[in-house]
Image (cartoon, helix red, strand yellow):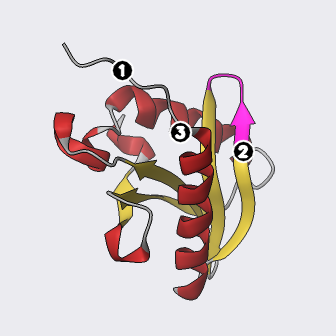
Amino acid sequence: MIPVKPKDTTDGARAEALAASFLQRHGLRVIEHNFRVRGGEIDLICRDGNSLVFVEVRLRTHREFGGASASISPAKRRRLILAARHYLVRQPDAICRFDCVLMDGLTEANIEWLRNAFSADDM
């Protein structure tokens, strides 16, 4: 049995900062970090033209259990969608999408950006 290592908040914060910088260089504007509501959290909220983009940042330094993309379970997607719905109360007519920034290390070379990674309709 492999012991579960608690999430290193330092690495998590560095991953989110790296993702924000990467997305800004690709034309998105970060408007909020770590939006939290009871039952959910969104790492980054960005603007891409007229669209709001809710971004989940996942860092996995080991590929056991499927790597970063496998860690975005249906339960995680439900929590992201819940938080997005709370955010959208402020802007009910906004066009939005869910993106994921996946990293297998803390360098830009390790970033995989999945646009429209999932939809609220998928749940």
- The quarter in which the C terminus is drawn is top left
The N terminus lies in which quarter of the figure? top left
Amino acid under label 2? Phe
Which comes sooner in the sequence, label 1 or label 3?
1
Which region shows up in magenta? 35-39
Question: Which of the two residues, 78 or 101, is positioned nearer the viewer here?
Answer: 101
- Distance of label 1 from label 2 (alpha carbons): 26 Å
* Residue 123 drawn above or below residue 63: above
Q: Is residue 44 left or right of residue 78?
A: right
Q: Secondary structure at mark 1?
A: loop
Front label number (1 vs 2): 1
Q: Position of residue 112 (x, y in %)?
A: 33, 67
Q: Circle 2: is it few (<14), some (14-19), or many (20+) Cα within 10 Å?
A: some
User: Any mark on residue 35, and which?
Assistant: 2
Would residue 51 be seen by someone viewing this image from the given angle? no
Earlier sequence position, callout 2 versus callout 3: 2
Which is nearer the N-term, disc 1 or disc 2?
1
Main SS, magenta residues: strand
Q: Which residue is mark 3?
A: 80
Real-space Cα distance between discs 1 and 3?
Answer: 23 Å
Any part of residue 42 in sight: yes
- Tag 1–tag 3 contact (CB < 8 Å): no
Residue at figure coordinates x 49%, y 51% from the top left: 56
Residue at image coords 20%, 45%:
63
When asked about the image quadrant of residue 62, the answer is top left
- The three-letter amino acid code for the residue at tag 1 is Val
In front: 44, or 5? 5
- Residue receiving disc 1: 4
Rendered location of residue 98, percent (x, y)? 47, 56
Question: Which three-letter amino acid code belongs to the residue tagged 3?
Answer: Leu
Residue under the point 42% across and 37% down:
77
